[in-house]
Image (cartoon, grey):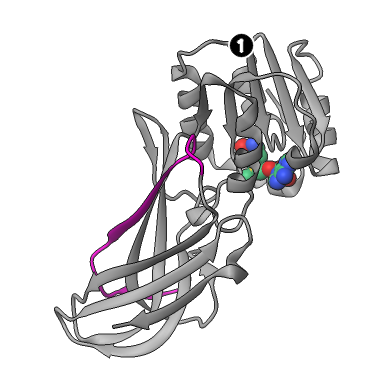
């Protein structure tokens, strides 16, 4: 099927690994199939994947141009209703068996996955499911060239510690968007540390975990105060951010 899209949603469609993990997770879904919500449907591609499985799909998209594309792309599907609305303003009237919500970004900081699901989960049946199911966040110490928060899109950096897993969120659980943790690293070499690299792994279902992909959670590089470190030193870093409030909410500091 050919999709009419905005340039951003076209880039999302070109990331075929991203599409394939969502396609497989929807194919492997084995719950009831009366109603699914596709939250932030964009071009409508995930609603299209849902269309052969579900009796009814309600697809919400806040951005007007993307909504117009999705409406046209999905016009031939009698079981899909595309609505131009912010999820947080939508008056849900029915409980769904499945929510698909791809408002993902690294550590769920910059997009609205957490606030949107916090609201929309009330309209999920007790045995309902969410795709993706969970996310896992990992961090490494780095020496990086740039001095601002940025996604890993080719800028150079050197890894200075092992990767530590520092948080896991099951999206069916209540999630406090205010995140704070002390990350404990062991230095792998003598070097100047000046940054953190955050990598997010997306658990689509029990069988499928996606690492970073070009349009799904590229690693995030975050500046840290400079510190000379020696091999086998232990370095503790406090990190704070608010999920859904953007990368401007990130704060880091080296602590004892
Ligand atoms: C990462 S894109 C995914 C698009 C599409 N589901 C896909 O997989 O190709 C996230 C989409 O969510 C939409 N979005 C973000 N916040 C939203 C909100 N509060 N309500 C409805 N749509 C939202 C964005 O406009 C964007 O189209």
Please tell me whether residue 91 belongs to the stretch shown in magenta: no
Residues in magenta, as a range: 156-174
Point 34% across, 28% down: residue: 207
171, above or below 8, in the image = above
Q: How many marks?
A: 1
Q: Quadrant of ligand 1?
A: top right
Please tell me whether residue 163 belongs to the stretch shown in magenta: yes
Q: Badge 1 is on which residue? A: 52
Side of 89 where 126 appears, left or right: left
Point 34% across, 69% down: residue: 182
Circle 1: element type: loop
Quarter the N terminus occupies: top right
What crowding class fits label 1: few (fewer than 14 Cα within 10 Å), some (14-19), or many (20 or more)?
Answer: few
Side of 63 where 110 appears, left or right: left
Q: Nearer the viewer, residue 90 or 207?
A: 90
Q: Nearer the viewer, residue 53 or 116?
A: 116
18, above or below 51, in the image = below
Q: Nearer the viewer, residue 154 or 103?
A: 103
182, above or below 52, in the image = below
Q: Measuring from the top left, give residue 167's x and y in whole percent.
A: 37, 53
Find the residue positioned furthest to the left: 232
Q: Measuring from the top left, give residue 170's x and y in whole percent.
A: 43, 39
Point 81% across, 36% down: residue: 67
36, above or below 142, in the image = above
Q: Quadrant of residue 10?
A: top right
Quarter the C terminus occupies: bottom left
Q: Measuring from the top left, give residue 229's x and y in whole percent.
A: 24, 87
Point 54% across, 52% down: residue: 105
């Amino acid at each position: 099927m050919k999709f009419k899209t905005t340039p951003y949603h076209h880039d999302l469609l070109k990331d075929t690994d991203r599409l394939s993990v969502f396609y497989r997770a929807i194919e492997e879904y084995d719950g009831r199939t009366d109603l699914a919500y596709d939250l932030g449907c964009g071009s409508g591609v995930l609603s299209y994947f849902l269309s052969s499985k579900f009796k009814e799909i309600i697809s919400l998209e806040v951005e007007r141009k993307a909504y117009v594309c999705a409406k046209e792309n999905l016009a031939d599907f009698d079981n899909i209703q595309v609505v131009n609305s912010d999820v947080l303003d939508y008056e849900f009237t029915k409980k769904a068996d499945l929510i698909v919500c791809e408002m993902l970004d690294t550590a769920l900081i910059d997009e609205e996955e957490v606030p949107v699901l916090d609201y929309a989960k009330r309209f999920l049946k007790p045995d309902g499911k969410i795709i993706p199911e969970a996310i896992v966040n990992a961090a490494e110490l780095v020496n990086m060239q740039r001095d601002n928060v940025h996604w890993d899109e080719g800028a150079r950096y050197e890894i200075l510690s092992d990767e530590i897993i520092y948080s896991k969120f099951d999206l069916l659980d209540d999630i406090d968007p205010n995140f704070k943790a002390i990350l404990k690293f062991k230095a792998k070499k003598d070097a100047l540390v000046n940054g953190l690299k955050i990598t997010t792994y997306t658990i689509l279902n029990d069988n499928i975990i996606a690492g970073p992909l070009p349009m799904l959670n590229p690693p995030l590089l975050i500046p840290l105060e400079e510190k000379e470190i020696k091999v086998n030193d232990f370095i503790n870093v406090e990190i704070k951010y608010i999920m859904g409030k953007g990368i401007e909410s990130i704060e880091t500091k080296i602590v004892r």
